[in-house]
Image: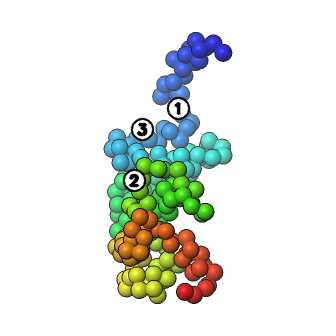
């Protein structure tokens, strides 16, 4: 292969004017790096199928957020950021369930992806008395797990949620 052919293609097409239609274009609308990181995660996560549908899906998700960083922060106080914490668990932990891959992040820093199953089980097991499945509760449950497994704060998450989803008791 002739490198010059690729260099000419790069010089010709590696320009913003050729980005549309591509989910990458959403990142340009967010000068704050914190927003751009979240927008990139959303856009890349929805980047499958026909590009027209991708653009529509990403646009809808971002419209609901407003300012992505503030949305995540506000959500952290009320919806416990379950999906984001779940994503982090998948990417950081490496065992028979979680595939891992992010070796630079310590599992001890993770937060339990709190959902209704984990919240109910956590209350029954005395990890929390809180009635709301919010960020404060997720942190409280995580701290309880951290006392049991300081090196892996979410080690028991999958097992307990599976038990709860199957209707089994401790």
Please name whichever residue, 79 or 55, is drawn nearer the observer in this view of the structure. Answer: 79
Left or right side of 99 for 114: left
> Under tag 2, what secondary structure?
helix
Q: Can I make out residue 79 in this image?
A: no
- Classify the position of the C terminus by image quarter: bottom right
Please name whichever residue, 22 or 154, is drawn nearer the observer in this view of the structure. Answer: 154
Contact between marks 1 and 3 (CB within 8 A): the answer is yes
Badge 3: how crowded within 10 Å, few (<14), some, or many (20+)? Answer: few
Q: Which mark is residue 33?
A: none
Badge 2: how crowded within 10 Å, few (<14), some, or many (20+)? Answer: many
- Sequence order check, earlier mark of 1 and 3: 1
> Under tag 1, what secondary structure?
loop
Residue 14: x %, y % from top left: 51, 24
Can you tell which quarter of the image residue 73 is in?
bottom left
- Distance from the alpha carbon under mark 1 to that under mark 3: 10 Å
- Distance from the alpha carbon under mark 2 to that under mark 3: 13 Å
Question: Which residue shows up at 56% across the image and 74% down it?
Answer: 159
Question: Which residue shows up at 57% across the image and 87% down it?
Answer: 169
- Classify the position of the N terminus by image quarter: top right
Q: Which residue is mark 2?
A: 68
> Under tag 3, what secondary structure?
helix
Q: Which residue is mark 3?
A: 28
Badge 1: how crowded within 10 Å, few (<14), some, or many (20+)? Answer: few
The colour mode here is: rainbow
Residue 140 against residue 64 in the figure, above or below: below
Question: Which residue shows up at 45% across the image and 85% down it?
Answer: 125
Q: Which residue is mark 1?
A: 19
Residue 37: x %, y % from top left: 41, 46
């Amino acid at each position: 292969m002739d490198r010059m052919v690729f260099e000419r293609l790069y010089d010709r097409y590696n320009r913003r004017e050729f980005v549309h239609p591509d989910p990458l274009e959403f990142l340009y609308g967010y000068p704050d790096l914190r927003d751009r990181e979240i927008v990139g995660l959303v856009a890349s996560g929805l980047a499958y199928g026909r590009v027209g549908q991708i653009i529509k899906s990403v646009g809808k998700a971002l419209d609901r957020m407003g300012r992505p960083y503030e949305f995540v922060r506000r959500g952290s106080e009320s919806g416990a950021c379950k999906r984001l914490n779940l994503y982090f668990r998948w990417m950081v932990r490496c065992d028979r369930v979680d595939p891992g891959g992010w070796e630079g992040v310590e599992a001890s820093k993770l937060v339990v992806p709190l959902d209704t199953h984990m919240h109910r089980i956590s209350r029954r097991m005395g990890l929390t008395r809180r009635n709301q499945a919010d960020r404060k509760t997720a942190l409280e449950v995580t701290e309880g797990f951290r006392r049991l497994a300081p090196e892996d704060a979410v080690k028991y998450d999958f097992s307990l949620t599976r038990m709860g989803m199957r209707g089994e008791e401790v």
